[in-house]
Image (cartoon, rainbow, N blue to C red):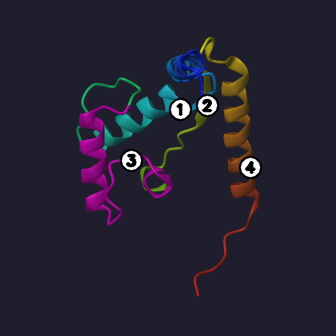
Amino acid sequence: MFPRATLIFFSLAFMVAAATRLYAERLMASEDVETAQRTLQARGFDPGLFTGTVTPATSHAVRQFQSKNHLKVNGQFDAPTQAALGVVIRMVESDPVLGVTQEAREAALRGTKGAEEITRAKPSEPNK
């Protein structure tokens, strides 16, 4: 069996790692969430204050929008909801020390622009 000191050490190490979140976290870009909130407001769904974060009021507005548009009602800005709203919410990495890095924002923006270019270049198929 482990000596008591070793067990305490590993327990403390685990708690420190969890508390400081030594790994990067993926978050929705706040300016994109704010754009989605403004779009919901313009379409008649009240997301509350335009905070750039998903608040309970925003989730409620998203659920109402999803219900009215025959989407899966989960209160989240999933891909079908973003498409129906006509918005794109980029995911950026958040460093626990530096916050969201400029490099991560630029990479997310490049990814979004690349997706838009692919969509524009691909001819739409006729309805069958």
Residue 123 falls left or right of residue 73: right
Evaluate if marks 2 and 1 touch, with contact meaning CB atoms under 8 Å apart: yes
Residue 47 seen anywhere in this rendered image of the structure: no
The answer for how far apart the CA atoms under marks 3 and 2 are is 17 Å
- Residue stretch in magenta: 54-82
Please, is residue 125 above or below residue 55 in the view? below
Mark 4–mark 1 distance (CA, rounded to whole Å):
24 Å
Give the residue number, with chain letter if any, for mark 4: 117
Q: CA distance from mark 3 to mark 4?
A: 26 Å
Which residue is most to the top? 97
10 Å crowding of disc 3: few (<14), some (14-19), many (20+): some
Name the residue beneath numbered marker 2. 92
Q: CA distance from mark 2 to mark 1?
A: 5 Å
53 over 72 or under it: above or below: above
Q: Which badge, 3 or 2, comes first in the chain's sequence?
A: 3
Q: Earlier in the sequence, mark 3 or mark 4?
A: 3
Q: Position of residue 123 (x, y in %)?
A: 72, 68
User: Residue 91: x and y, percent?
Assistant: 58, 36
Which tag, 1 or 3, sits closer to the chain's start?
1
The amino acid sitting under disc 2 is Val
Please name the residue that numbered disc 3 is placed on: 76
Q: Which residue is mark 1?
A: 27
Identity, as a three-letter code, of the amino acid under mark 3: Gln
For marks 4 and 1, the one nearer the N-term is 1
Q: Position of residue 115 (x, y in %)?
A: 70, 49
Q: Secondary structure at mark 2?
A: strand
Q: Say if 74 sits above or below 95 in the image.
A: below
- Is 60 magenta? The answer is yes
Mark 2 closeness class: few <14, some 14–19, many ≥20 residues within 10 Å: many
Q: Residue at 69% across / 57% down in the picture?
A: 119
List x then y, in percent, for residue 72: 36, 62
